[in-house]
Image (cartoon, grey):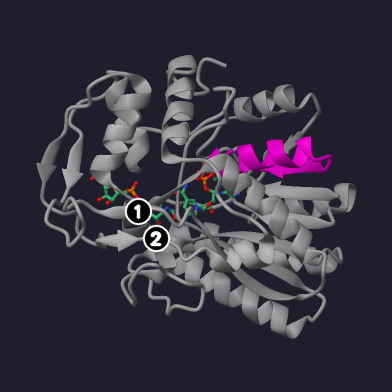
Amino acid sequence: MRVLVTGGAGYIGSHTTLELLANGHHVVVVDYLSNSSAESLRRVAGLAERPVELVEANVGEAAALDAVFARFAPEAVIHFAGRKAVGESTRLPLLYYRENVAATITLLETMAVHDCRRIVFSSSATVYGSASEAPFAEDAPTAATNPYGRTKQMVEQILADAAAADPALSVAVLRYFNPIGAHESGLLGEDPKGVPNNLLSFVAQVAAGRRTGLQVFGNDYPTPDGTGLRDYVHVVDLAQGHLSALDRLGEGGGYRVWNLGSGRPASVLQVIEAYARAAGTRIPYRLVAARPGDVAASYADVTKAERELGWTAHRSLDQACADTARWQAGSPDGYAAG
Ligand code: NAD
Ligand code: WQD
């Protein structure tokens, strides 16, 4: 298939682009590199031994997007492009509504003009908020608690309405839990700019001696060791979930939602211990107050993805830590060194 991947130079997009190429699909990436580098795609092309074209454009730019559709005629779109930092979204909500919501409308309009009727969308477990308790099934109520999460909820609604209005439109909403890990080659991984927002990226930089001051947010949650429980899912498993979703979209129009998680909760302390084992080092940390807005436990009910997509996350937390440690050792400055 010819697949347009928005945000394909980023963390999850680059791993998914590699899986697409490895499975014989043709890929064009649209990414304006606001949080990534073209080097990730050079490495993807090297690993796949196949070319991948990068068009440096904002998905919200209708003319640029139209030109890509006219030339490449994609049969499906995987839409990763978007901003994802919760704290930043509270400071800059309009940027988030423009880049995550308005840009998606431009994308859907362009798809309609070019008769492209299949889209996989990157949503997030953050949409569940605190409206119900883990494990979250796809029909649990949603109630995002910050502007970033609300952009995901809004786009889900827009996609549902668009699919209801056009029976030929085939939509897969994938709600990722906590993506971690790296490609087993050590050549692809997460390359956060500045202070990492997510736990494992921070832990990896502390283990590598690049950063000090790891804080564990909260140790009196009602969980086995008192720290927060999350559903960490290996990025390569996640990437493969997109190919399973693409297969299902071929079966006809409609709006469908699947959780992509491991379904196996791990605590903050378990993540730190697993990474310390993988990297063969001690990881100092301090227990501090809970982070405002955090829930005690967030993990997936994965039965729907297993049943309908035939997809499960096979890789363990230990494997994800080993792969991240390999990426960290091989590319200590991320993609910056080329
Ligand atoms: P990322 O920042 O590494 O990748 C996003 C990519 O999109 C970047 O390469 C960025 O340059 C590009 N981009 C952003 N806005 C764009 C725009 N308007 N036009 C063109 N390119 C644009 O993030 P990621 O972790 O790979 O996340 C991918 C998607 O998955 C995002 O939509 C994110 O919200 C969602 N998601 C991520 C996580 C996570 O923890 N990583 C969890 C749940 C959902
Ligand atoms: C994981 C656990 C923290 C950092 C976020 C977004 C969510 C989704 C995934 C995009 C929690 C604890 C963290 C630290 C810590 N992204 N922690 N010390 O908050 O589950 O989800 O990323 O969609 O929308 O909200 O992930 O990695 O920040 O935290 O103790 O320095 O680690 O309290 O229990 P989170 P996280």
Q: Which mark is residue 230?
A: 1
Q: Which residue is mark 2?
A: 299
Decide which of tag 2 and tag 1 comes sooner along the chain. 1
Query: Does mark 2 have its CB less than 8 Å from ligand 2?
Result: no
CB under 8 Å between callouts 2 and 1? Answer: yes
Q: At which x and y percent is residue 249?
A: 77, 65
Magenta-tinted stretch: 10-31
The total number of labels drawn is 2
Determine if the magenta segment contains residue 29. yes
Task: Look at the image and tell me whether residue 205 can be seen.
Answer: no
- Picture quadrant where residue 183 is located: top right
In the rendered structure, which amino acid carries the disc numbered 2? Tyr
Q: Residue at x 39, y 60 (%)?
A: 299
Specify few, some or many for label 2: CA neighbours under 10 Å numbering under 14, 14-19, or 20 or more.
many
Determine if the magenta segment contains residue 1. no
Callout 2: SS: loop
**Up-down: is 47 above or below 72?**
above
Task: Look at the image and tell me whether residue 152 can be seen.
Answer: yes
